[in-house]
């Protein structure tokens, strides 16, 4: 029997590979502090983690994913792909429509990424 068991009650932090040992401070108004707290709570993460993620994303120039662009492109794809056959007098079966919706669901995010990448050039 081992005297120093690995199950001695002390738990190691999961996946703790980065040690942060530098602090930066900032001052906020009461309203700004309340908003930061609300957003972090809504995201389900500690305030410091949320602030760090926002700052590092900005430094890395990684835009926050904007789902509205993907949804707009999805609606555009749907309109184009449904209205064109209808304008030509063709009927669209339910199966074809469902398949179209599945294709749009997978393509819209890829297209949004391409649009954003083209805009950054």
Image (cartoon, rainbow, N blue to C red):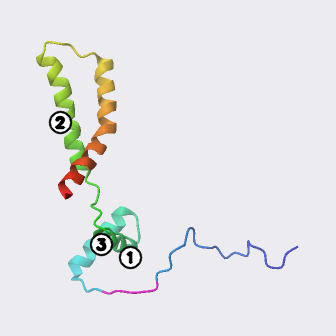
Residue beneath label 3, please?
59
For the residue pair 5 and 20, the one nearer the viewer reads as: 20
Label 2: which residue?
Answer: 76
Q: Position of residue 98 (x, y in %)?
A: 32, 25
Mark 2, Cα crowd under 10 Å, few <14 / some 14-19 / many 20+, is some
Whichever of labels 2 and 3 marks the residue nearer the N terminus, that label is 3
Q: Secondary structure at mark 1?
A: helix
Q: What quarter of the picture does the C terminus occupy?
A: bottom left
Residue 56 position, x and y percent, is 34, 72
Specify the quadrant of the image occupied by residue 43. Answer: bottom left
> Extreme left residue here?
87
Assess disc 3: are there few (<14), some (14-19) or many (≥20) residues with their C-alpha within 10 Å of its C-alpha: few
Q: Residue reaching furthest front?
A: 121
Badge 1 crowding class, 10 Å Cα cut-off, few under 14, some 14 to 19, many 20 or more, is few
Disc 2 to disc 3: CB gap under 8 Å: no
Nearer-the-camera pick, 5 or 55: 55
Q: What element does badge 2 sit on? A: helix
Residue topped by disc 1: 48
Residue 17 percent location from the top left of the image:
54, 73
Earlier sequence position, callout 1 versus callout 2: 1
Residue 30 drawn in magenta: no
Which residues make up the magenta segment?
21-25
From what the image shows, is residue 42 above or below residue 95? below
Res 87 → quadrant: top left
Q: What residue is shown at x 15% (from left), y 22% (from top)?
A: 84
Q: Are marks 1 and 2 in contact (CB under 8 Å)?
A: no
């Amino acid at each position: 029997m081992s005297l120093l068991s690995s199950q001695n009650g002390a738990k190691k932090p999961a996946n703790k590979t980065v040690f942060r040992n530098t602090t930066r401070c900032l001052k906020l108004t009461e309203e700004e502090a309340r908003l930061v707290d609300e957003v972090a709570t809504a995201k389900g993460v500690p305030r410091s983690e949320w602030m760090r993620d926002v700052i590092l994303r900005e430094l890395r120039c990684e835009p926050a994913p904007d789902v509205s662009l993907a949804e707009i492109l999805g609606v555009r794809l749907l309109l184009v792909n449904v209205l064109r056959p209808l304008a030509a007098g063709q009927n669209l079966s339910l199966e074809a429509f469902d398949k179209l919706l599945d294709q749009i669901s997978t393509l819209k995010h890829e297209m949004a990424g391409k649009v954003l990448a083209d805009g950054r050039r």
